[in-house]
Image: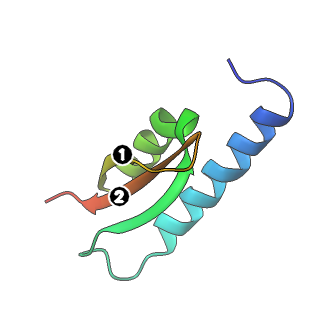
């Protein structure tokens, strides 16, 4: 479970992700960005709400993953 500053950081990151996916004009292309690995489940829920699938891929940076949001047909 996240505590204190980690909860704030997770909320900020996921709020920003929600805004980014909502603002996309061209929804026919995948969108990729790095997120904290602990936010994977929350990112998947946000992706579904905006009509995207989520694929998480490992990166060299500890505690991070590359998140690819692809339009679901």
The residue drawn where x is 23% and y is 75% is 28
Q: Which mark is residue 46?
A: none
What is the spatial separation of the Cα atoms under label 1 and label 2, in whole angstroms?
6 Å
Q: Between residues 18 and 33, which one lies in front from this camera angle? A: 33
Classify residue 1 as left or right of residue 5. left
Query: Is residue 60 visible in the rendered structure shown here?
Result: yes
For the residue carrying disc 1, how many other residues have a C-alpha within 10 Å: few (<14), some (14-19), or many (20+)? Answer: some
Above or below for 38 versus 3: below
Query: Is residue 50 visible in the rendered structure shown here?
Result: no
Image location of residue 11, percent across then percent down: 70, 43
Total of numbered circles in the picture? 2
Residue under label 2: 68
Say whether disc 1 or disc 2 marks the residue closer to the N-terminus: 1
For the residue carrying disc 2, how many other residues have a C-alpha within 10 Å: few (<14), some (14-19), or many (20+)? Answer: some
Above or below for 36 versus 5: below
The residue drawn where x is 56% and y is 58% is 17
The residue drawn where x is 55% and y is 38% is 39
Q: Residue furthest top?
A: 1
Residue under label 1: 56
Q: Residue furthest right?
A: 4
Give SS at disc 2. Answer: strand
Asked if the residues shown at circle 1 and circle 2 are in contact, with their CB atoms under 8 angstroms apart, the answer is yes
């Amino acid at each position: 479970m996240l505590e204190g500053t980690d909860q704030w950081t997770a909320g900020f990151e996921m709020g920003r992700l929600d805004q980014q996916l909502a603002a996309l004009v061209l929804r026919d292309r995948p969108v990729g960005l790095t997120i904290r690995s602990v936010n994977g489940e929350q990112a998947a829920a946000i992706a579904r709400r905006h009509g995207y699938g989520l694929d998480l891929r490992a990166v060299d940076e500890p505690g991070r993953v590359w998140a690819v949001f692809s339009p679901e047909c």
